[in-house]
Amino acid sequence: MKIRKICWVSLVFALMCAPLVFAQTTKPDPGNFDRFIAQVYTGEGSRMITPDSRRYVFMKDFLENRISFISSDKDKLAAGNYKKLSQVPLFDLYNKGLMRDASFDPTTFNPFKYQLGFYEPETQVFHVDGTDYLIVIQPQESRKDR
């Protein structure tokens, strides 16, 4: 009984302190999805991603469930060995006019503009140059996990 009480108190303490320990996490606005797709997939590419296609479903799931933006302090960022967003090539196969973002805003950032490794089996982490933000991409669930 005494051990249960200690565990319970420890859990409550940990939950109260969690906001102080963990960095702020932001998710992209799913309302931007169609605009993001239209920006990247122009011309022939626009026929590849239609609302009834598997690719559309995959990409929508990616935006809604697998990518997040974490604001961290500069000391933790400096200690990490993260790939810089500036080192990631643009995905300009269907839109040669795509340009890198001049500034970073997690609510308007279009991840489909970049070759971020959506299919990698491990979590991907990228540092957005000149900011306190990390882009975190969780791996795709395998069919056997569903």
Image (cartoon, rainbow, N blue to C red):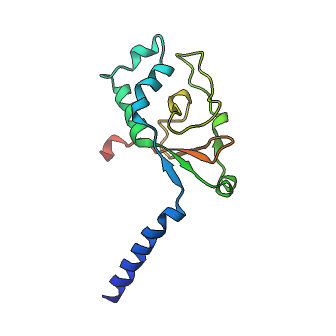
Image vertical order of residue 121 relative to residue 80, above or below? above
Which residue is rendered at x = 39% and y = 39% of the image? 64
Whether residue 2 sits left or right of residue 85 in the image: it is left
The percent position of residue 141, horizontal first and vertical second, equals: 38, 43
Image vertical order of residue 49 relative to residue 43, above or below? below
Farthest residue, direction bottom: 2
Q: Nearer the viewer, residue 72 or 85?
A: 72
Which residue is rendered at x = 40% and y = 73% of the image? 12
Farthest residue, direction top: 43
Residue 2 lies in what quarter of the image? bottom left
The percent position of residue 62, horizontal first and vertical second, equals: 42, 37
Image quadrant in which the N terminus is located: bottom left
The percent position of residue 6, horizontal first and vertical second, equals: 39, 83
Which residue is rendered at x = 39% and y = 20% of the image? 49
Image vertical order of residue 82 relative to residue 95, above or below? below
Image quadrant in which the C terminus is located: top left
Q: Nearer the viewer, residue 10 or 114?
A: 10
Which residue is rendered at x = 60% and y = 16% of the image? 97
Whether residue 136 sits left or right of residue 144 in the image: it is right
The percent position of residue 88, horizontal first and vertical second, equals: 62, 33
Q: Nearer the viewer, residue 100 or 141?
A: 100
Image vertical order of residue 79 relative to residue 16, above or below? above
